[in-house]
Structure formats: structure tokens, C-alpha cells
């Protein structure tokens, strides 16, 4: 960059702050807004509203947990859209519904703002390493404008298609992730109930090819009872709910996703802020009769 650009973060939690660290290393300046005024390690300046962040930033990057948080951050007198100018770039990395994604794109278009839906695949370790997969929806020219930012936070950018495609692809990916974890949790529960040695069982699942690297990481942590949040249960359950709703709107039968959503709803009641792999622990407690 010939001149330093400023990235304005709306939302600066576990994922966003790690993305911000990588952007700072690449030479970007940061400002941020969260409702609490907190986030990161304290080195990033916080402003009093999303609109103020948008006014100070060259590029606005949104990373909030759900549709309701997105609406609160984007719209109204203090929302980001109120502070943005024509042709400014708005990168929405949030995992939200297709409807919320489309509404934001339309609102941006009405103001001449360039909106890209670009949720990311990966958890906090990938965010810290700058190794996320960016799932971007928008036209070629917009993606090219955002590519320098994407290259700082991710190892790969998937151009999923026109606006809204990134949000829809994210639901597909998280559905596979959630259902895979549910299968792991249920089969571990069976193995324990059937009398298999616990240590052997967890170690064996870490060796076989049918388990994904992501789920192997979860199994290793679950063996030690470590459910430190890399992807909190409340967010995974939310994504499964969004996928189930999106599928129903298109009359796509999704019985596996429905069952997984129920499993994660149970886990959310028990461990909302722990990693979603806490479902493994929930199932283990059930078969041990100490739930």
C-alpha cells in the first residue's frame, strides 16, 4: 500500500480481533466499535458508534454473531450505513441468514455502497494464523477490490457467486461440520456404553481416515474434557437453525440437519459459551448416567 488504509471493525470479538491482528501486521490501521466498547487486547481504538467507525474507515468489516446484531449495527442513525459514503467497501464476514444478507446488499446498493458477503470458514486457530477460507459473494470487480484484505486474513478466497452466495455456502459448510460432530458424539457414546476403553476409543478415532482433521482436533480436546471455545455452541446452534430454516424455505428435506439442530440446542442449554464439541461431553455424561 502506498498510503495506509484504515479498516473499521464492527464487532471485535475472538475472530475479528485475530483478523485485525493480521491486518495490522500487513500495514493497515484499525478502529473498532462494539456495544460494550471492549474487545481485542486494548491496542485498537474504539469509537462510540458504528457510524463513527464508518466515517473514519476506508473499508468497513463487519463481524457480528447473528441477524439481530447485524441489524443493530448497520441501520439507524448510529448504524454503519449512516456513516458510509458512496463506493465505500463493506465486508460482511458475519454468519447470518440469506435474508439478512440480501437486505444488507439492497440497503447498500440504494446508497451506492459496495457490499460483499464474505463469511469465513475456520475457527480461532485459523483466524490467528491468517489461514481462514473466505467465502465471498459479489461480482468480480468487487472481489478484486477486497482481495488484499482477504489475503491478509485467509489462505484461500472462494468466489461463491453473486451477492448472497457466500452466506449460503457458509450454511452448507457449517451444516457438514455440525452434522459430522453429532455423528462423532453419538458413536463415541455408543462405544463407551458398549464397554470400549475410553482412552483407546478416543485415540483410535484420531487415527482413522473417515474422521476429518477438524473433528480429530475436537476429539483430542474432548478426551481431556477441554471445551475451550474455538466455535461456541451458541453460534453453531444458530447456524444450524439458519440452515434448517433456509432449507425449509426451498422445500429441501433435511432430517439429519433437524436432528443435529436438536442435539446442539440441548448442548446450548448446557454449555452455550463452550466449544460446540461440548456435545461429545454431553453424550458421554448421558451414557455414564451422570447427566
Image (spheres, grey):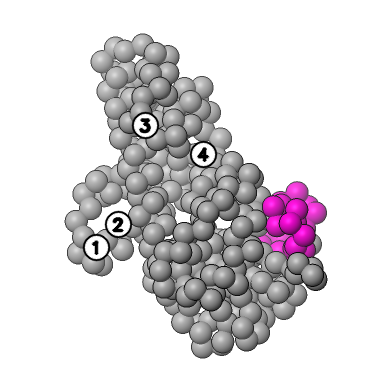
Q: Nearer the viewer, residue 63 or 285?
A: 63
Inter-mark Cα distance, 2 to 1: 6 Å
Residue on which disc 3 sits: 211
Contact (Cβ within 8 Å) of mark 2 with mark 1: yes
Contact (Cβ within 8 Å) of mark 2 with mark 3: no
Which mark is in front, 1 or 4? Answer: 1
Q: Residue at x 69, y 52 (%)?
A: 22
Please say whether residue 163 is visible from this viewpoint.
yes
Mark 1 vs 4, N-terminal side: 1
Residue on which disc 2 sits: 244
Q: Which mark is residue 248?
A: 1
As helix, strand or loop, the secondary structure at mark 3 comes to loop
Picture coordinates of residue 269, whole percent (x, y): 42, 42
Which mark is in front, 4 or 2? Answer: 2
Q: Nearer the viewer, residue 255 or 21?
A: 21
Contact (Cβ within 8 Å) of mark 4 with mark 3: no
Q: Decide: few, some or many residues near mark 4? Use Cα within 10 Å; few <14, some 14-19, many ≥20.
A: many
As helix, strand or loop, the secondary structure at mark 2 comes to helix
Residue 40 belongs to the span the image colors magenta: yes
Q: Which residues are magenta?
A: 21-44
Inter-mark Cα distance, 4 to 3: 22 Å
As helix, strand or loop, the secondary structure at mark 4 comes to loop
Residue on which disc 4 sits: 274
Q: Residue at x 65, y 56 (%)?
A: 152
**Left or right: where does residue 20 sit relative to residue 105?**
right
Inter-mark Cα distance, 3 to 1: 29 Å
Q: Decide: few, some or many residues near mark 3? Use Cα within 10 Å; few <14, some 14-19, many ≥20.
A: some
Picture coordinates of residue 4, whole percent (x, y): 79, 68
Amino acid at each position: 500500500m502506498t498510503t495506509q488504509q484504515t479498516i473499521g471493525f464492527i464487532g471485535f470479538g475472538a475472530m475479528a480481533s485475530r483478523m485485525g491482528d493480521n491486518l495490522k501486521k500487513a500495514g493497515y490501521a484499525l478502529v473498532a466499535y462494539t456495544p460494550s466498547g471492549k474487545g481485542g487486547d486494548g491496542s485498537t481504538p474504539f469509537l462510540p458508534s458504528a457510524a463513527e467507525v464508518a466515517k473514519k474507515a476506508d473499508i468497513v468489516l463487519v463481524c457480528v454473531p447473528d441477524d439481530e446484531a447485524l441489524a443493530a449495527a448497520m441501520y439507524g442513525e448510529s448504524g454503519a450505513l449512516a456513516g458510509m459514503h458512496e463506493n465505500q467497501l463493506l465486508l460482511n464476514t458475519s454468519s447470518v441468514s440469506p435474508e439478512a444478507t440480501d437486505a444488507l446488499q439492497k440497503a447498500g446498493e440504494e446508497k451506492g455502497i459496495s457490499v460483499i458477503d464474505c463469511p469465513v470458514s475456520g475457527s480461532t486457530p485459523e483466524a490467528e494464523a491468517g489461514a481462514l477460507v473466505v467465502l465471498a459473494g459479489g461480482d468480480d470487480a468487487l472481489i478484486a477490490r477486497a482481495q488484499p484484505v482477504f489475503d491478509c486474513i485467509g489462505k484461500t478466497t472462494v468466489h461463491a457467486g453473486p451477492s448472497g452466495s457466500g452466506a449460503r455456502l457458509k450454511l452448507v459448510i457449517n451444516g457438514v461440520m455440525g452434522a459430522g460432530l453429532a455423528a462423532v458424539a453419538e458413536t463415541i457414546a455408543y462405544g463407551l456404553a458398549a464397554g470400549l476403553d475410553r482412552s483407546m476409543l478416543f485415540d483410535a478415532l484420531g487415527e482413522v481416515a473417515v474422521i476429518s482433521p477438524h473433528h480429530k482436533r475436537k476429539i483430542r480436546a474432548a478426551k481431556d474434557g477441554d471445551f475451550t471455545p474455538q466455535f461456541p455452541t451458541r453460534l453453531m446452534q444458530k447456524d444450524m437453525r439458519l440452515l434448517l430454516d433456509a432449507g425449509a424455505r426451498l422445500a429441501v428435506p433435511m432430517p439429519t440437519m433437524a436432528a443435529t439442530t436438536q442435539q446442539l440446542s440441548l448442548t446450548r442449554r448446557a454449555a452455550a459459551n463452550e466449544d460446540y464439541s461440548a456435545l461429545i461431553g454431553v453424550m458421554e455424561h448421558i451414557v455414564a448416567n451422570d447427566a
